[in-house]
Image (tube, helix red, strand yellow):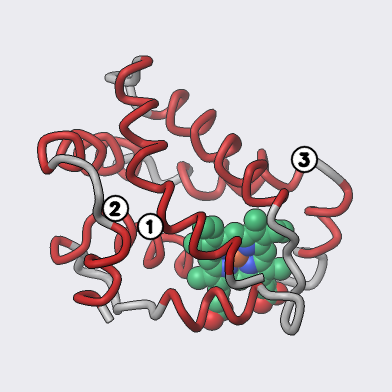
Amino acid sequence: MNVVMNAGVKGVSNESADRVWRSYQRCLEDYHFLQEFYLRFIETSPEVAQKFANTDMDHQVLMLRASLDLMLGGDRSTSEPVALRQVAKLHSRHGVDVPPRLYDCWLESLLLTVARFDPGFDDELEQAWRAELQKGVAYMKAAY
Ligand code: HEM
């Protein structure tokens, strides 16, 4: 799956991808990074909060970590591989029913959290993060 994901998700230069990977690693140095992302994301709307009403958030944080490792790190990822196709299927209208517009909230919440946790964050890095995640998010939206 890693190979498939890399073919589809990697699109920008390696230098830019490396900067984002290092930024992500700086964020992960603080254990609260992913938890704070979810708090922020859930606060964006009652619709999002409702989706996670019965969710085990510790498990959820681990799964998000694995997805981000894959989307941002490709072969550098040391997490148990996640199949994005399965994740997309789970999120579709046939699963937990996540409409495409909620991915925009997801992305903005993530970038706001990165901005808070990465001391090296700046406008250029923000654009690099957007570019790195763009294909994965587009893939999830398209699978709705
Ligand atoms: C690219 C963006 C996203 C990624 C990579 C992602 C990733 C994941 C992963 C890996 C899981 C866990 C699957 C499992 O347990 O096997 C999950 C579950 C879930 N995600 Fe996402 N997700 C994304 C966006 C969203 C958005 C925008 C929403 C909107 C509310 C959402 C709502 C959910 C829900 C409701 C679950 C199930 C939680 C449960 O088991 O109770 N996700 N997601």
Query: In the image, what residue occupies the spot 29% across and 53% down?
Result: 72
Query: In the image, what residue occupies the spot 49% across and 49% down?
Result: 34
Q: Is residue 69 above or below residue 12?
A: below
Query: In the image, what residue occupies the spot 66% across and 39% down?
Result: 40
Q: Which comes sooner in the sequence, label 1 or label 3?
A: 3
Q: Is residue 67 above or below residue 2?
A: above
Q: What residue does disc 3 label? A: 43
Q: Which comes sooner in the sequence, label 3 or label 2?
A: 3
Q: Is residue 38 visible?
A: yes
Residue 127, image quadrant: top left
Camera-side residue of 25 and 12: 12
Q: Is residue 137 above or below residue 83?
A: above
The residue type indicated by label 1 comes to: Leu
Describe the element under mark 1 as helix, strand or loop.
helix
- In 3D space, how far apart are the residues under numbered discs 3 and 2 (Cα atoms)? 25 Å
Q: What residue does disc 1 label? A: 68
